[in-house]
């Protein structure tokens, strides 16, 4: 949690500047070169000078360190989390409001913080920015930001946001582009609201901000079985029409700039039953964490992957994924088995916790994974668990831990990176 006097160090990494100058976990940094520190962004911004004078407090005692920062040197410290600005909208498709009780507490936080957008790529609607926030974004060049637009029609957007007083998003984006702040945009596609003609108009309007708008992603609305609002899911016909609109804009922008600018989420193509574009079609993959280009990147990396460490071919492995990615992962592992002799079985996990319409691996719970694996563990020694289903403490969304999985299934469970190299690395471990 933040303190009113600065930002508290949570962890010091060995070999960094912080360790060298004697900073310690628990120290509260108050200022850098007489600039007051409100959060880690201030430290990043003011800490770039060559000569640094850092004022801090340790166990109630004020102290000061003066130092010279060598080019390329890394501080090597982590701060305790700061208090997050929360969302005051009442979006008709809000995923937080579709969550049942009993999950990790952090999942119920409705984040609407421009700092989290800059630091971690979280999407914000720009509906709670004060003038001081805008001024800071410009002064500290907090770019790029990640912005949920949904529609440039104010009436449609405000209806989607459940906020009749939300500011005109076009004016907000104009302010950012006028001040050369770059941004990535997402449109959560809700059939009957912002599809069809409204989608085409929104894509047309957003192009006005090129080149400050780096990318626009069209993502199908995610609906769980716990939703209360009557929002219709994206069906195949909706997805086909959306992809048709997206590709018509892509052709235009590729011709003008060599850059598609507009992208459809992987799930949109899967719902439409269409072949996914190649990885190179996604350019710099600005929105890969939003499920845009993720499958194509995995397939591209799998094709190029070279095995550099001997794999443990005598052991039998088990792994899993969501139902949408299952066919792609199954093909990759079949090729890996044929080429390297690896014995590994992959199985799809249907999302019973949120509902079968939620098909991505990142929203699987520990209980659903355990239920799906119970009859599959015989003869297997290790289950490889993709990191996208776990938090930093190795907990699933429902607070089930990796250790719980091991104790329940009776086999070891090993966290791996959800990449071809991550899978190979998990198999190569003894």
Image (tube, rainbow, N blue to C red):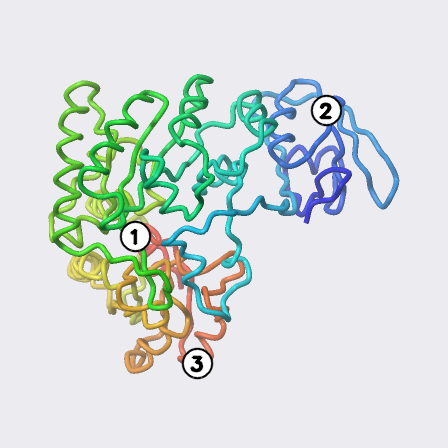
What residue is shown at x 21% (from left), y 49% (from top)?
268
Above or below, 16 relative to 159? above
**Picture coordinates of residue 418, whole percent (x, y):** 34, 54
**Picture coordinates of residue 8, whole percent (x, y):** 71, 43
Mark 2–mark 1 CB contact (< 8 Å) = no
Q: Nearer the viewer, mark 2 or mark 1?
A: 1
> Element at badge 1?
loop
Q: Within 10 Å of the Cα at label 2, are there few (<14), some (14-19), or many (20+) other Cα atoms? A: some
**Picture coordinates of residue 236, whole percent (x, y):** 14, 55
Sequence-wise, the earlier of marks 2 and 1 is 2
What residue is shown at x 28% (from left), y 43% (from top)?
292
> Element at badge 3?
helix
Residue 166 position by quadrant? top left
What separation in Å lies between label 2 and label 3 (alpha carbons)?
53 Å
What separation in Å lies between label 2 and label 1 (alpha carbons)?
43 Å
Q: Which residue is denoted by mark 1 in the rendering? A: 221
Q: Which residue is denoted by mark 2 in the rendering? A: 35
Q: Which residue is denoted by mark 3 in the rendering? A: 408
> Which residue is more in the foreground, 167 or 323?
167
């Amino acid at each position: 949690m933040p303190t009113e006097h600065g930002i508290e160090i949570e962890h010091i990494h060995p070999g960094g500047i912080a360790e060298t100058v004697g900073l310690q976990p628990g120290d509260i940094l108050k200022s850098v070169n007489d600039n007051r520190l409100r959060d880690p962004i201030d430290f990043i911004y003011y800490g770039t000078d060559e000569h640094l004078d850092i004022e801090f407090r340790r166990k109630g005692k004020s102290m000061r360190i003066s130092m010279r920062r060598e080019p390329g040197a890394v501080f090597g410290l982590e701060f305790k989390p700061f208090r997050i600005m929360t969302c005051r909208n009442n979006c008709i498709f809000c995923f937080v409001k579709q969550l049942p009780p009993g999950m990790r507490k952090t999942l119920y936080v409705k984040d609407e913080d421009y700092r989290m957008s800059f630091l971690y790529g979280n999407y914000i609607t720009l509906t709670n920015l004060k003038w001081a926030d805008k001024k800071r974004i410009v002064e500290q060049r907090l770019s790029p930001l990640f912005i949920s637009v949904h529609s440039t029609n104010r009436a449609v957007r405000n209806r989607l946001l459940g906020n009749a007083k939300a500011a005109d998003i076009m004016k907000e984006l104009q302010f950012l582009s006028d001040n050369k702040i770059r941004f990535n945009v997402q449109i959560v596609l809700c059939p009957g609201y912002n599809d069809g003609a409204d989608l085409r108009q929104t894509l047309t309007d957003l192009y006005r901000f090129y080149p400050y708008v780096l990318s626009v992603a069209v993502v199908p609305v995610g609906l769980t079985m716990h939703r209360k609002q009557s929002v219709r899911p994206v069906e195949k016909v909706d997805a086909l029409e959306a992809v048709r609109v997206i590709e018509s804009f892509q052709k235009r922008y590729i011709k003008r700039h060599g850059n598609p600018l507009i992208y459809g989420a992987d799930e949109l193509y899967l719902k439409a039953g269409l072949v996914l574009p190649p990885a190179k079609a996604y350019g710099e993959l600005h929105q890969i964490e939003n499920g845009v280009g993720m499958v194509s990147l995995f397939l591209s990396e799998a094709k190029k992957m070279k095995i550099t460490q001997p794999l443990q071919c005598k052991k039998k492995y088990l792994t899993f994924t969501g139902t949408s990615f299952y066919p792609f992962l199954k093909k990759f592992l079949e090729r890996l088995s044929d080429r390297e002799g690896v014995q590994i079985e992959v199985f799809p996990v249907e999302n019973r916790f949120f509902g079968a319409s939620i098909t991505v691996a990142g929203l699987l719970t520990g209980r659903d994974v355990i239920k799906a694996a119970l009859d599959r563990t015989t003869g297997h020694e290790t289950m490889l668990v993709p990191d996208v289903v776990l938090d930093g403490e190795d907990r699933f969304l429902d607070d089930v831990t990796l250790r719980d999985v091991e104790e329940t299934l009776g086999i070891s469970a090993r966290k791996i990176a959800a990449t071809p190299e991550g899978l190979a690395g998990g198999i190569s471990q003894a």
